[in-house]
Image (cartoon, rainbow, N blue to C red):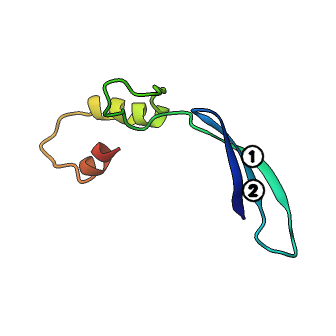
Amino acid sequence: MRIRTSVGQTPCFRSTYYQCQNVACGATFSGSVTIDYQLSPSGLAQPLMVLPVAPAVERMKALRDNAKATDQMDLLAALEEAV
């Protein structure tokens, strides 16, 4: 399967048209691609789009902010900060 064409409707929505690469099949499909959330903020002062932060990112931040302070090092802290 490959994307044959893609048409941008808005900055966050595209209509896509797919085509099976098996010559004997020849099936075609239509679909859409949307951008719903941001995972990390833009580095620009005035980005072209501002989307809500993904719920999973907000939840991880809340868990990190409310965690009990311990002297034990967190092995996954570096991975969580990358998100």
Residue at 41% x, 36% y: name it: 57
Counting from the top left corner in percent of width and height, residue 69 is at 18, 35
- Mark 1 → mark 2, Cα distance in angstroms: 8 Å
Mark 2 residue element: strand
- Label number found at residue 66: none
Instruction: From the image, tell me which residue sits under label 2.
Output: 18
- 42 relative to 51 in the view: left or right: left
Mark before the other along the chain sequence, 1 or 2:
2
**Location of the C terminus (image quadrant):** top left
Residue located 56% across and 33% down the image: 36
Q: Quadrant of the N terminus?
A: bottom right
- Secondary structure under badge 1? strand
Q: Position of residue 52 (x, y in %)?
A: 48, 26
Q: Which residue does the image show at 85% across and 62% down from the upper left?
A: 27
Along the line of sight, the residue nearer the viewer: 10 or 33: 10
Q: Residues within 10 Å of mark 2 (few under 14, many from 20)?
A: some
In screen coordinates, is 14 left or right of 39? Answer: right
The residue where tag 1 is placed is 31
Q: Vertically, is 25 above or below 73?
A: below
- Residue type at mark 2: give it: Tyr
Q: Are marks 1 and 2 in contact (CB under 8 Å)?
A: yes
**Where is residue 17 shown, x and y percent of the image?**
75, 51
